[in-house]
Image (tube, helix red, strand yellow):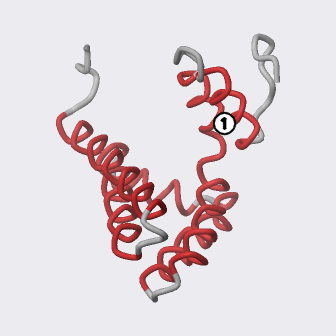
Amino acid sequence: MPTMWLSDSQKVGVAFCSGGGFFLVGGVIMFFDRAMLAMGNILFLLGLTLIIGLQKTAVFFARRQKLKGTAAFAAGIILIVLRWPLVGFLIELYGIFVLFGDFFSTIGGFAGNIPVVGPYIQQALVRAGGGRRNAELPV
C-alpha cells in the first residue's frame, strides 16, 4: 500500500483521527458515555491538526462561512464535558455537518467502491452533505 505521499506526522494524524472516530462511535454505543465522547473529540482534533497543520486547522475553523459550525462543534464539546453528553453530541453532530459537509460527497466517491453496500453509503453521504448530484450517481 503506497503511503509515500504522507509524512510521518500525517500518518500519526490519520491514526489519531481514526481512533477518535472509534471512540466517538464507542461512546454512542455505550449510551453516550461522556469519557469516550470526550476522548474521541480530543483524538479527532489532534489528528486533524497533525494532518493539515496548526495554521490551516485554525484557518479552517475560523472561516466566516464555517463560524456557525465551529460554534456548534465547540458548544457540543463543552456540553459533553459538563455532563450533558446526549445534548452535546447532537449539537456537535450539527456542527460536524456544517463544517465537513463539503467533504461528504468526496468520501462517498471512495465509499462507492465497497462491494454490496458501497453505493448505498455513497448515496447517503452525498445526500447528507447536500452536494450536487453526479451524472454517474443515480440519487
* Residue at (80, 30) in percent of width and height: 132
Image quadrant assignment for residue 81: bottom left
**Figure check: 75 above or below 95:** below
Q: 21 and 102: which one is in front?
A: 21
Residue 9 in the image, given as x and y percentages of width and height: 20, 42
Callout 1: SS: helix
Q: Residue at x 40, y 64 (%)?
A: 41
The answer to whether 34 appears left or right of 79 in the picture is left
The x and y percentages for residue 8 are: 17, 35
Residue furthest toward the front?
A: 30
Q: Residues within 10 Å of mark 1 (few under 14, many from 20)?
A: many
Q: Quadrant of residue 5?
A: top left
- Viewer-nearest residue: 5 or 20: 20
Residue at x-position 77% and y-position 19%: 134
Amino acid type, mark 1: Leu
Give the position of the N terminus as an image quadrant.
top left
The residue to which callout 1 is attached is 125
